[in-house]
Amino acid sequence: MISVESLTKQYGRFTAVDHVSFTAAPGRVTGFLGPNGAGKSTTMRVMVGLTRPTSGRVTIGGRDYRELANPGLEVGVLLDASAQHAGRSGREILAIAQQTMGLPRTRVAETLARVGLTEDEAERRVRNYSLGMRQRLGLATALIGDPDVLILDEPANGLDPAGIRWMRDLLRGFSDDGGTVLLSSHLLHEIEVIADDLVVIGQGRIVAQGTKAELLAGAGTIVRTHDTDVLARALTEAGLVAHPVDGGLRVDAEPETVGEVALRAAVPLRELRGADGAGLEEMFLELTADTAREGAAA
């Protein structure tokens, strides 16, 4: 289990992470979401001992990462697939990890096969790898110690559709076997497909967290019409809360209630449906509208 307790990180007067608390549980995939600059990477760097927190703490299995005698055997980490020695081959990079962790030599070939890197690809210099191949090599380095916890930042970046499906199946199998997965990604559809739990961060603070089912089920109703302003006024007069979203409105009410208000206001509807069908993207955009770089600029 990963436990984040009131974590704060300040750089001078700037607060990158502000009293963040959440857990990532064994046997589950936790999606860690937020706009650029929201504090995701800083939080993950603190988790693995690369950045010291200003206050608060992160424990993995009840211990600080820096207290682990051989961390690769307990925690697999992939924060930047490009941060690999460009002059070494993929096999050499895995061999160094194998030797550092005191693992048998056979683990190198086993792990290369597990992440789908061929013998020919394993002998190439990393400078000649595509981004997708670097992601596979980074995952191999994270997995070679057979850890119980994976901390992954954008692991699907650069993978083609088949590679994304492969990674999804790999992580799902890892968690089904009791492993803990913390996964940050800008590919919201992939998070929606694989994640059990969601943690959403904006401007260094948690703006939502819970199971995927809970967060999406509480999303209300999506409604679209050519007379959005008229409908918005009618909904407000009826005591309902409506939020603009992607050319329509998300209303904190059941579809039947929204439809009745529209009927009384004589507003024809183009779309009316539960927002749980709208998916993670609309929920994410609404929750982070005030904290996203684009939204802040606007």
Image (cartoon, rainbow, N blue to C red):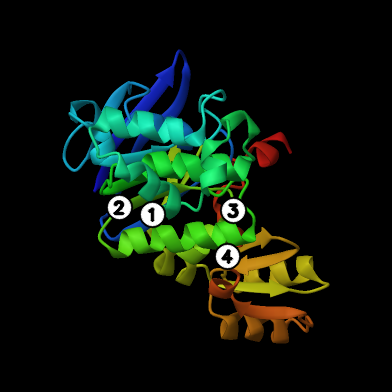
Residue occupying image coordinates x 31% and y 44%: 106
Q: CA distance from mark 3 to mark 1?
A: 14 Å
State the SS at label 3.
Answer: loop
Give 214 or 121, whichever is nearer the viewer.
121
- Amino acid at circle 3: Leu
Q: Nearer the viewer, mark 3 or mark 4?
A: 3
Q: Relative to residue 225, is residue 57 depicted above or below?
A: above
Disc sitting over residue 30 in the figure: 1
Q: Nearer the viewer, mark 4 or mark 1?
A: 1
Q: CA distance from mark 3 to mark 4?
A: 29 Å
Q: Residues within 10 Å of mark 2 (few under 14, many from 20)?
A: many
**Residue 195 visible here:** no
Residue occupying image coordinates x 36% and y 50%: 110
Residue occupying image coordinates x 56% and y 31%: 82
State the SS at label 2.
Answer: strand
Q: What x and y, as percent, mark residue 183?
A: 44, 49
Q: Which residue is mark 3?
A: 187
Q: Which residue is mark 2?
A: 180
For marks 3 and 4, the one nearer the N-term is 3
For marks 3 and 1, the one nearer the N-term is 1
Q: CA distance from mark 2 to mark 4?
A: 37 Å
Write down the quadrant of residue 128 in the picture: top right
Q: Which residue is mark 4?
A: 241
State the SS at label 1.
Answer: strand
